[in-house]
Amino acid sequence: MQRPMPTYNKSTYCKLLLIALFLLAPLYFQPNLGGTGLDLTYNIPVWAIASFLIGGGLYLIAATQRFIRPMHAWAFLAFPVVILLSGIITGSSQPIPWLFRQIYVVGGILFLLTLFQFNIKQNQAERLLYVIAVSALVSALIAITQIHSPELIQGWLVTVGNIPIGLFQQVNVLSSYLATGIIISFYLISRPSITSASLAAKASLIACIGSSAFIITYIGSRVGILSAAIGLIIILISRQQQLKKRSALALIAFLSLAGGAIPGGTTKEGFKNLSQKTTEVAKGVNSSYRVNMYAVALELIAQKPVFGHGIGNFQRVWGLQNGDYYQRNPSAKLPPYVTHPHNELVYWLIEGGIVSFAGIIIALGAIVLALIRCGPQRGGGYVALLTPITLHAQVELPFYISSLHWFLWLFLVFLILRHRITISTLSLSLSATRLIKVTAILSCIGSSYFLIHSARAQSDIYAYLTKKESSTPYLQVALNNLYFKSYAEQLAMRNLLHSSIQNKKPDKVHYFAQWAEQQISINPELKLFEDLINAYTFLELEKERCKTINTGTMMYPMNQPLKKIALTCKESS
């Protein structure tokens, strides 16, 4: 018979890891080139902490011989199952991106289910919400520092003039995080526990609201302002009775909101950014981009509606369909470069088809059902908490830029689901118990090694590109890293191309051209077209050069450099 693990120990383990996840992990920074995923270095400790939490939950299941799950837990397992099924049927020309997309989804579902194993109580959950509010406050203060005194943090964080890019290195990702912090703060003010909260805790909530409102309006982030406004309206409607009971503190909170939002919005930068974006919408510039992007997306969905085009194949199929759409609609406004349709649901419809989309809808249906069961007051509060990140995912790609947003969203979902749980008693043999425990420990060690290795690989790539270390062995770590291998290979091959052209070695340039042709057929990145054109120019293969230019122009019709050199092919033909 296995002894239950002491409640204090398991809850402390979970709380400490969640505090580290939301408060400490975002502070980790090493120089990087930006982008998504592990290219942004704060995502590395975020995943490391999440893996320890998942490993701890798995160990706990074996130690206590019980599994705690929310009602309709199968609905959340359906999504990874259907995308795996879709991937097997459609295949993928890029197995590594496919693998990491699977890990992203499965890791998130395991994180969500793991939280139930630690039996987090209501007061503990609310304390963790205070931690998230403080995390938003820290992000806002750092962004304010980037505006007024960026030199104070230049040795630690990347700065871009006086632009408040925050810890996330992207303004809209910062805005949705801060908007969530504002909604969490108002939600906590409406909770009975606020009466016994310390003065420091109350002051942190007020400071979070004011500083976050200042940054969101200073940036002029429409998604931040809109999501914060919608979330506040929902809070006011659903929790008005609770806010009335704490009217003095609620009034101070609204004064802090106005005290931050008005100065931020009326600054030269805030007014300029917001008015410029509003003018663009009025003129139809941004809306035209969206309309045409969704038109291309619908055509792609119609081509393979059931299982989609395959996980990781988006850029290839988008480029082909984008070019075809532009030829049929030459006056259409399209963005010059697209790696994501800026809508999470559309993204999955294109790559995973209706099957993957159904998996998402089933999971969302379980969340909606749980919200209804929570009642209008509590359920309305939870809807408000989810609003900023959920809305952001429908217009951009916050989950791929920031893994912290992914785990924060899942933690908020956990708060909704934890009110109705089922506890199953397990009867595991001694061998099975030991195997699970060893697997849990080894998974933590293995993920930690991989993430440390990835941090080194990312650091080497940054040094290679910024310090002009031309030696390819300098990329050796990255070439042996599963996540960065593809990018490191591109850099090494690009180095081979340039050195071969410089040293006049046509055989090696031919070798590069063959490699680049294959890569373009799999993942037609814009930079690869540039490199291949340079290779064919050196080799004086005009037919192949023009074919590459025409293909690139077709896939990227709004790219001006490609359009310009395409004229040389027309003149020579």
Image (spheres, rainbow, N blue to C red):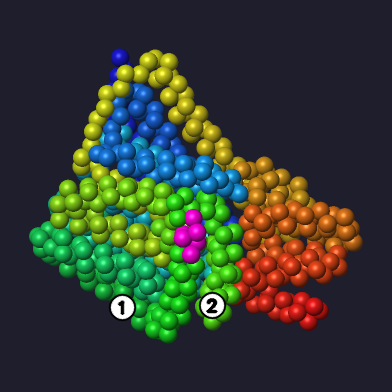
Q: Which residues are magenta?
A: 299-304
- Residue at 55 percent across and 63 percent down: it is 318
Locate residue 174, reporting x and y percent: 42, 63
Helix, strand or loop for disc 1: helix
Report whether residue 174 is seen: no
Most extreme residue toward the right is 504
Quadrant where the C terminus lies? bottom right
The answer to whether the residues at label 1 and label 2 have Cβ atoms under 8 Å apart is no
Judge by depth and name the residue closer to the eye, 82 or 42: 82
Q: Earlier in the sequence, mark 1 or mark 2?
A: 1
Q: Quadrant of residue 330?
A: bottom right
- Residue at 28 percent across and 32 percent down: it is 68
Task: Work out whether 13 lies above or below 564.
Answer: above
Q: Is residue 272 magenta?
A: no
Residue named by callout 1? 262
Task: Work out whether 434 lies above or below 239.
Answer: above
Real-space Cα distance between discs 1 and 2?
Answer: 43 Å
Residue named by callout 2? 329
Q: Is residue 552 left or right of residue 88?
A: right
Mark 1 crowdedness (10 Å alpha carbons): few <14, some 14-19, many ≥20: some
Task: Work out whether 26 lies above or below 434.
Answer: below
Q: Quadrant of residue 210?
A: bottom left
